[in-house]
Amino acid sequence: MFKRFATIAIVLSVCLCLALLIVPSPGIQQASAASYAEPITELAIGDTWSITYKDYNGNDLAVSLPATYPTSYVEGMGETLPTVAPPGWMPDYDFLGFWDCPLDPSQTVPIMGTFPAREGLNFQIGNQITVISSTATGPITLYLRCTSNAVDVDIAGNENYLYAPPGVFPNGTTANILAWAPSTTEYQSLLLELDGLQPAMVKFVEFSVMGSTQNQIQPLPFFGDAVVGFKVPDGFSKNDLALFRIVFSGSNVELISSMWTDPSTGEYFIEGRTDHFSPYALLDLATPEIPSAEIPSTNDISSAGIVLALTLFLGGVLLILPGILALSTKRQRCSIQ
């Protein structure tokens, strides 16, 4: 009997040991999974990745970067970016920082004013980056972004004006205008630059736009177009106006223009978008009317025709009448003989 119980105990012990060997405990399984994942993470930490800098519209930065601008980062360590623009890059512009995407000039936001709405770029599009995170992986491309004040200049009591959304001109921009009188040599010379157009009336004006150092500048069209506006002079036909930019070495450019009325004065203004400054011509292309006193009436034309016909007829009669009389006389003489 004792041997039988001993045999059963031994068999049960062997089975228990085998069960423990085949089915691992939860603790052993969890420890095994953790030790398997750890080497993968350790392999990634410490890799070096490049940092590339581009300008606001995605072109490679053309200026030399100072040593404060990191050109690489170590994964897992992070990197704080400078808070100033590279020296010499976009002077007289406000440096906004670094973004993860270039500016998109097709995405504009309206800038509402008293008169027609203007457009400007959305400078907040995308995500600003001030620190490269320690969890970042792979190469990083950063886009330097800047802006400037909008330019809104009235000249000669709003008779002429210039507007540009942020970014088009640097800070510190000033402007003035020259309006050529018909008696000036400049006016007469510009008349020869109208590509054959013969307007009833014309007004020539020229903007001069200067930067902070009083050097003449042109707009940066990437950020948008400048808007030039002029008061419509008295006597111009409001329905036949056209606004041109004079191009001395080629064909003139007709500006996309629109008209508006100042509600406080009832005065008419015309404005157009431009990406370059040179003399502008405001043309009244209405067909000149001939004064009624200079237009001969139908009755006058008929009377003149009748008088002319009678004159020619009588003149012809007077020319041939002597011949007829002489011939008649000759016949009478022959018949008498």
Image: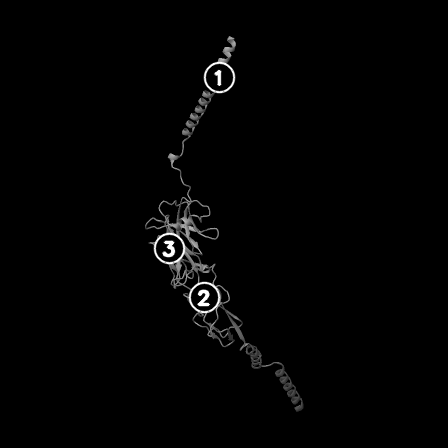
Q: Nearer the viewer, mark 1 or mark 2?
A: 1
Callout 1 environment at 10 Å: few (<14), some (14 to 19), or many (20+)? few
* Residue 7 image-quadrant placement: bottom right
The residue singled out by tag 3 in the image is 177
Residue 186: horizontal and vertical position, in percent?
A: 40, 51
Residue sitting at x 51%, y 12%: 331
Residue sitting at x 65%, y 89%: 6
Q: Is residue 133 left or right of residue 291?
A: right
Badge 2 or badge 3: first in the primary sequence: 2
The residue singled out by tag 1 in the image is 324
- The residue at the far top in this view is 336
Callout 3 environment at 10 Å: few (<14), some (14 to 19), or many (20+)? some
Give the Cα distance between marks 3 and 1.
82 Å
* Residue 92 image-quadrant placement: bottom left
In the rendered structure, which amino acid carries the disc numbered 1? Answer: Ile
User: How many marks are shown on the rendered structure?
Assistant: 3
Residue 329: horizontal and vertical position, in percent?
A: 48, 13
Callout 2 environment at 10 Å: few (<14), some (14 to 19), or many (20+)? many
Residue sitting at x 48%, y 16%: 326
Per the image, label 2 sits on a secondary structure element best described as: strand
